[in-house]
C-alpha cells in the first residue's frame, strides 16, 4: 500500500538509513537520479551511487550527514538535463524512532525551474520599473521643479511685463 501511495506522486521521494542506503523510494526518484549517474537507483542501493558522480555524491553526502544530526533543511540544486539548466528544491528531514533516536533521512525533490524562470522575469521587470522610477524622479523632476518655480514668478496680471519675456 505504501509503495502504491508514493509511486502515485510525481515528485521524487526517498528514505535512507544511517548508512545512506535507500530504504524506500518511488519511481520518480529512480528516474530523477538517472540525471546524476545515468541509471536508476532503488531500494537497498547506496544513495550516493557508489561515487559514480563525485560532484553530486559529495554534495548530497554533506546534506545527508547534516540531516542525520537532526538539522532539517531545503537546498536548491541546479543540474544539466538535455543541455538545459533545471533547478530542483531538495528537502532533507531527519527520521526518528519512538525513542527519539535519528534512524535515517526522509527526502523529497521538486522541480522549481518554471518558478525560477518566472522569478527571473519578475526581477527583470522590476529592474525596468526601477529605471523608469529613477528617470521620473531625477531626470524629469529637476527640470519640472524649475519650470514650476519660474511659473510662480510669472506676472499673470500683466503678461506684457518685461520680466515675463525673460522668464
Image (cartoon, helix red, strand yellow):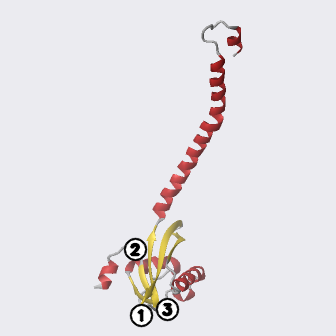
Q: Which residue is mark 2?
A: 11
Residue 141 percent coordinates (x, y):
63, 33
The kind of secondary structure element at disc 2 is: loop
Residue in the picture at 46% in, 88% down? 104
Dot 3, crowdedness within 10 Å: few (<14), some or many (≥20)? some
Point 43% across, 88% down: residue: 96
* Number of residues whose C-alpha sits closer than 10 Å to that of mark 1, classed few (under 14), some (14–19) or many (20 or more): few
- 167 or 87, nearer to the observer: 167
Q: Secondary structure at mark 1?
A: loop
Q: Earlier in the sequence, mark 1 or mark 2?
A: 2
Q: Nearer the viewer, residue 46 or 139?
A: 139
The x and y percentages for residue 26 are: 38, 81
Sequence-first disc among 3 and 2: 2
138 relative position to 67: left or right: right
Residue to which mark 1 is pinned: 99
Mark 1 or mark 3: which comes first in sequence?
3
Q: Position of residue 16 (x, y in %)?
A: 45, 87
Picture residue at 37% right of the left edge, 73% below the top: 10
Figure quadrant of the C terminus: top right
Distance, label 1 to label 2, CA atoms, is: 30 Å
State the mark number for residue 18: 3
Disc 3 and disc 2 in contact, CB within 8 angstroms: no
Amino acid at each position: 500500500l505504501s509503495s502504491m501511495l508514493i509511486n502515485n506522486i510525481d515528485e521524487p521521494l526517498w528514505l535512507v538509513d544511517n548508512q545512506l542506503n535507500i530504504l524506500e523510494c518511488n519511481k520518480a526518484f529512480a528516474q530523477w537520479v538517472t540525471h546524476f549517474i545515468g541509471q536508476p537507483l532503488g531500494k537497498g542501493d547506496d544513495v550516493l551511487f557508489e561515487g559514480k558522480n563525485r560532484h553530486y555524491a559529495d554534495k548530497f553526502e554533506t546534506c545527508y550527514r547534516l540531516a542525520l544530526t537532526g538539522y532539517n533543511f531545503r537546498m536548491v540544486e541546479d543540474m544539466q538535463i538535455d543541455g538545459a539548466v533545471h533547478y530542483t528544491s531538495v528537502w532533507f528531514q531527519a527520521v526518528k524512532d519512538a525513542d527519539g533516536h535519528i534512524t535515517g533521512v526522509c527526502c523529497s525533490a521538486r522541480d522549481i525551474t518554471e518558478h525560477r524562470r518566472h522569478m527571473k522575469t519578475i526581477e527583470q521587470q522590476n529592474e525596468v520599473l526601477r529605471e523608469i522610477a529613477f528617470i521620473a524622479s531625477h531626470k524629469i523632476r529637476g527640470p519640472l521643479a524649475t519650470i514650476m518655480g519660474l511659473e510662480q514668478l510669472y506676472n499673470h496680471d500683466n503678461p506684457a511685463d518685461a520680466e515675463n519675456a525673460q522668464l
